[in-house]
Image (tube, rainbow, N blue to C red):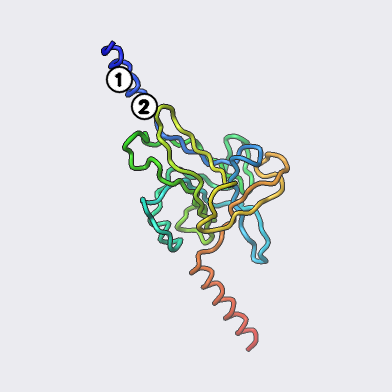
Amino acid sequence: MKLKLTVASAIMALTVASQAATYTVSNVGDGLTDVLLQNGKNLDNSVRLLDGGIVSLGYFPSGYVFTTVSAAITNYTSLTSAFAGSYSATLDASKPGYVEAATFQGATIATGNALAGRALYVFAGNASTLAGSTGFGLQQVGSIQLDEPLEQSYSVTLAGAPAPIFGQVGSYTGDAGGQGVATYTTLNLVPETSTALLGAIGALGLLRRRRN
């Protein structure tokens, strides 16, 4: 009996070691569940779906305290990312604001792994990289779970998630990503405080120049 238990334990150990965490960023669904759409704001403050930009899924050091966007980018570890409006394997078309990433196979998250239980975040920007972006959205969307005994899959759900650290949660009514007309949850990007301040100073300078 002891021998059988030992063999069974060895087989289970091999099975667990062969598995890895699966992370998915997508808005394929019914418009209510795994929805992730980037929103941007035009100069007239009207909201629009972005036709570009990056959406990443990742984590921060344990106990990290958020201050500025630039500091967050420096301390952020990306697990997988995708580009808004890029080619979609699911829909076979490019859709504004639509984000879909291929499945990412990472290292096994087993007992004792420091990533187990770590908060999982969506970090979105309006350029091809977070560092090159001027608009940002950052929101916790879950936590990293153990792979044991089966592989875990993570898809992004903004509805019911904590309030964004940077950005705003909103909604978009329309045919987002070719899924049919519905009201979709969105992550609205906002400028970093320093960027917004510089823009405001520039606008004031232009007004003063016009008055003169």
**Foreground residue among 207 and 193:** 193
Q: Position of residue 172 (x, y in %)?
A: 68, 50
Q: Quadrant of the N terminus?
A: top left
Q: Position of residue 105 (x, y in %)?
A: 42, 34
Residue at image x 43%, y 41%?
A: 144
Residue position for label 2: 16
Q: Secondary structure at mark 2?
A: helix
* N-term mark: 2 or 1: 1
The residue sitting at the top extreme is: 1
Q: Quadrant of the C terminus?
A: bottom right
Mark 2 neighbour class, 10 Å CA radius: few under 14, some 14 to 19, many 20 or more? some
Residue position for label 1: 10
Q: Please determine whether, in this image, residue 127 is positioned above or below residue 13.
A: below
Residue at image x 52%, y 48%?
A: 55
Residue at image x 60%, y 34%?
A: 90
Determine whether label 2 and label 1 are within 8 Å by CB: no
Q: Position of residue 135 (x, y in %)?
A: 54, 60
**Foreground residue among 44 and 59:** 59
Mark 1 neighbour class, 10 Å CA radius: few under 14, some 14 to 19, many 20 or more? few
Q: Please determine whether, in this image, residue 30 is positioned above or below residue 193.
A: above
Q: Which mark is residue 73?
A: none
Q: Amino acid under label 2?
A: Val
Q: Please determine whether, in this image, residue 139 is positioned above or below residue 179.
A: below
Q: Amino acid under label 1?
A: Ala
Q: Position of residue 179 (x, y in %)?
A: 68, 39
How far is mark 2 from mark 1, CA to CA?
Answer: 10 Å
Q: Secondary structure at mark 1?
A: helix
Residue at image x 63%, y 48%?
A: 185
The residue sitting at the bottom extreme is: 212
